[in-house]
Every structure is written in structure tokens, then in C-alpha cells.
Amino acid sequence: MKEIETPSDAALARLQEPVAGAPPTVAQTAYGRAIVVTSGKGGVGKTTTTANLGTALADAGKRVAVVDADVGLRNLDVVLGLENRVHKHLLDVIEKQCTMEEALVRDRVRRTLYLLPAAQNREKDDVPEAAMCSVIRALQTQFDFVLIDCPAGIEQGFRNAVAGAQEAIVVTTPEVSAVRDADRVIGLLPPNVPAKLIVNRVRPALVRKNTMMSVDDVNNILRLELIGVVPDEKEIIIATNRGTPVIDIEGSETGAAFRRIARRLLGETIEIPAFQERQGLFSRFMSTLGIARP
């Protein structure tokens, strides 16, 4: 990865426009945490993770900006239910077509949560790494957390997303291809960017049958600090189609898992539960009779 040019004070000043209606800005000497959410492989849940961690951190009273770095596609606005409110985007800010204030979209419910959307009609190569770094740095002066939704792959989009980050969350599913791609991404992260791991879409029934890798299997390969295990359940599809975070669905184990991850990011020590397979009516009946399943 080529060396990133450090943004000048003048570049930062041009980007540091106050956000309308936002809480008081973070002190200039106390930058917020910039965390890139990455994976290598597509479809493992980076965008869902970014959206739900952002909303959970906002619920905890933090000022949060989520940045869609997937230029050319753009899905973070859909997951948050904000697609109809997007008028400006990341490249408009970089190319000085608008201010940061004009591009940021405020969440409908969480008033300390903002989205900086990606452009759908542009290419990832249109984003200079130094400019991306300047954007993230400017956001850090106004928000406690800046979560960057990284595109799949290890090309220019990945380099742009990582450019301004000081921390990384690697998301993978318990599949050989996803774990291999995650391992590749970990090796490409700058040495000064510590990475943590989320294992997503775990199905206890398949793990029990030895047809899915266990969380221990995954982490024996990747060897990162594990900050969360997220079970696979239908609520995630329901939430995405509604444009609402899964953390808002009462009784959702997936939502509860994301809330626990957010609390761990805030420094709390919370045990990672071992998810149990949900039993059907017949299985529960057999259990009451003391008859084990084969």
C-alpha cells in the first residue's frame, strides 16, 4: 500500500464545516475514533454491521458519523432507511461541490447519528486517498465515532476506506472463502491500525453438525481480538427490507449481539455468549421426555 499523504491544515479547514443541528463539536485536540469495517469478501455483512453499530453507539449517547466508502454502489443509506434523503455525497464534498454540512444526512430517529453517502454514478478511482483521509479527519473533529463502510475487495476502494482509519473491524462469516479473504485483508492493513474480529451469521445447528466452522475454528486462523459473534436469523432480512436497524426488533438475538459489540467498543467487559440452536416444538417435546436428538 502506498504511503498516504498527510492532509494539510488548509485542507482540513476547508472540510471542517459545522453540521447543522449537531451537538457541540469535539475539542480540536480530542479527535473521535475512526474505525473501518472491512472483510475482503462481499456479502458477509459489513454494511449491516456498520449501520447497527452506528445506531447502537448513538443510542449510547455518542455522536456518530457512518461513511459509505463503496463508491459506485451505495447501500448504507438503504439499510438505514435514508435513501430518499440523499442529495449530496462524498465526492461532492471532496470536489468542493458542497460543504460537509450539506452532504451529511441526519438519521430520522437517532439525532446524533449522521450518514455521509457514497456516489452511485462515479468510480472508486475517482477518490484520492489523501482527500479521503482529510474527510475522515474532519469528521473526527465533530463526532465521537466515524465508522467507515469498506467496499469488498482489496483494490482502490479498500485503500480509500483504510486511508483515514486508526482502527479496523474485520467481519467474516464461518466459511472457508470468507475467512481466507479476511486473512488477506488483515495482512494488508497498515501496521499501526489494530484490528478486531466479528464473526457474523453463525448457525449453531450447522456448527453442531460439523457442517459449519465454529467461532474457535475461525479465530484459530485469524488470531484477532474477538469482539462479537452474531447469529444468523430471519430478523436481519426483515430489518433490511424495512430500512430499520435490526437492533430495533424486540427479541432479536442479532440485534442484541450488535448492542453488546457497541458496548465492548465503549470499553465495557461483556462475555460473548454461546448461542444455542433454537428448538422446534418436536425437539422441545422430546427434551421434556429426556430423549436426546440423534
Image (spheres, rainbow, N blue to C red):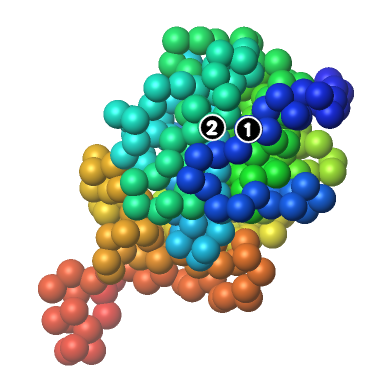
The residue shown at (49%, 73%) is 273
Residue type, mark 1 in image: Glu
Disc on res. 17: 1
Question: Mark 2 and mark 1 in contact (Cβ < 8 Å)?
Answer: yes
Secondary element at tag 1: loop
Q: Earlier in the sequence, mark 1 or mark 2?
A: 1
Residue closer to the observer: 259 or 20 = 20
Q: Is residue 102 above or below residue 209?
A: above
Residue in view at x 44 percent, y 16 percent: 120
Q: Residue at x 57, y 29 (%)?
A: 100
Task: Residue type at mark 2: give it.
Answer: Glu
Image coordinates of residue 223 in percent, x first then y, are: 71, 54
Q: Nearer the viewer, residue 208 or 128?
A: 128
User: In this rendering, does residue 207 appear at all?
Assistant: no
- Residue 190 point in image, percent of width and height: 81, 36
Q: Which residue is mark 2?
A: 101
Rendered image quadrant of residue 216: bottom right
The quadrant of the image that shows the N terminus is top right
Q: Secondary structure at mark 2?
A: helix
Left/right placement of residue 158 relative to residue 187 reads: left
Question: What's the mark number on residue 180?
Answer: none
Q: Is residue 279 visible?
A: yes
Residue 243 or residue 110, whichever sits in front: 110
